[in-house]
Image (cartoon, rainbow, N blue to C red):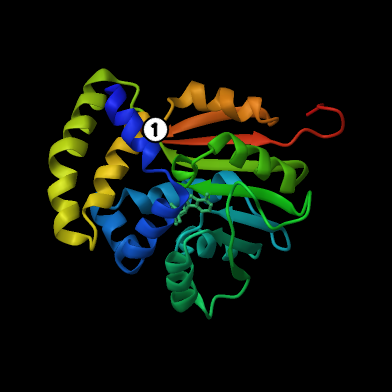
Amino acid sequence: MSSDQSHRADLQKDPARVSGMFDEVAAGYDRTNTILSVGNDRLWRVATTRALSPRPGQRILDLAAGTGTSSVAIARTGAEVVAADFSPGMIAEGQRRHAEVPGVSFVEADATDLPFEDEEFDAVTISFGLRNVQDADAGLREMLRVTKPGGRLVICEFSHPTSPAVASLYRFYNDHILPPIARLVSSNGDAYDYLNESIRAWPDQPTLAGRIRAAGWTDVAWRNLTLGVVALHRARKPVGDGGA
Ligand SMILES: C[S@@+](CC[C@H](N)C(=O)[O-])C[C@H]1O[C@@H](n2cnc3c(N)ncnc32)[C@H](O)[C@@H]1O
């Protein structure tokens, strides 16, 4: 990645621009995802819900929840899910689509300044959202604050394939195949140039694990999905004075 691209990805994380961009793509967001990921998005969501292992009666925060697709899957287990996002367009689309689903409530909230009390949630999860948060480290600290001691964190995010052959195929797909398809199927094809750049600028699996630890989480581990195109990071909030 050139430093120009990294700089552009950072500039485009301006919260007003990111929120506006998601407002624009909200209506077709989930369909575009499924097309561009060749259906893998469904597998990634199943893996995320399994890693979270929600139980009936637990209170779960699904942060940067977008249209609530992941929130609905979590609520099916009987947990109570708060789907929080700072894009009014994504929230409105989620409410329109999932109004009848029990156990899910939508809240407009910024990941770096959450409108929740300390230690309100049994678990916090964020899917394809942390990469978009302008200050991801502040987001990780806010997630820690609102989680109960011993509570879980699950982050599902695009990452970096570990095999050089897969990495170059993936790069070819992102550079040459994804942009024209995105222009065809999305209301804002440019948003997917940002997607490509932000994925390249995003830290690899061990670096992200280090940042999660630095924010105060413990027992940090990850596993790759789809050969590392996506990584699922897990962690726990320490109990007491930093003990696990
Ligand atoms: C790629 S979408 C992911 C949506 C959903 N989690 C999913 O898996 O489909 C990223 C979401 O992050 C939200 N987002 C980005 N920065 C945010 C922030 N600082 N606070 C809250 N939401 C944010 C955007 O509004 C958008 O809905």
Across and down, in percent, residue 194 comes to 30, 43
Residue behind mark 1: 159
Q: Residue furthest top?
A: 164
Across and down, in percent, residue 76 comes to 57, 65
Q: Camera-side residue: 83 or 78?
A: 83
Residue sitting at x 63%, y 41%: 153
Q: Quadrant of the N terminus?
A: top left
Q: Camera-side residue: 162 or 195?
A: 195
- Whether residue 236 can be seen here: yes
Badge 1 density bin: few <14, some 14–19, many ≥20, Cα 10 Å: many
Q: Camera-side residue: 59 or 210?
A: 210
Across and down, in percent, residue 188 comes to 24, 58
Residue 132, by quadrant, is top left
Q: Camera-side residue: 7 or 184?
A: 7
Residue sitting at x 32%, y 62%: 25
* Drawn side of residue 215 relative to residue 36, left or right: right
Q: Residue furthest bottom?
A: 100
Residue sitting at x 43%, y 65%: 90
Type of amino acid at the residue the image marks with label 1:
Ser
Relative to residue 15, is residue 197 depicted above or below? Answer: above
- Identify the element where label 1 is drawn: loop
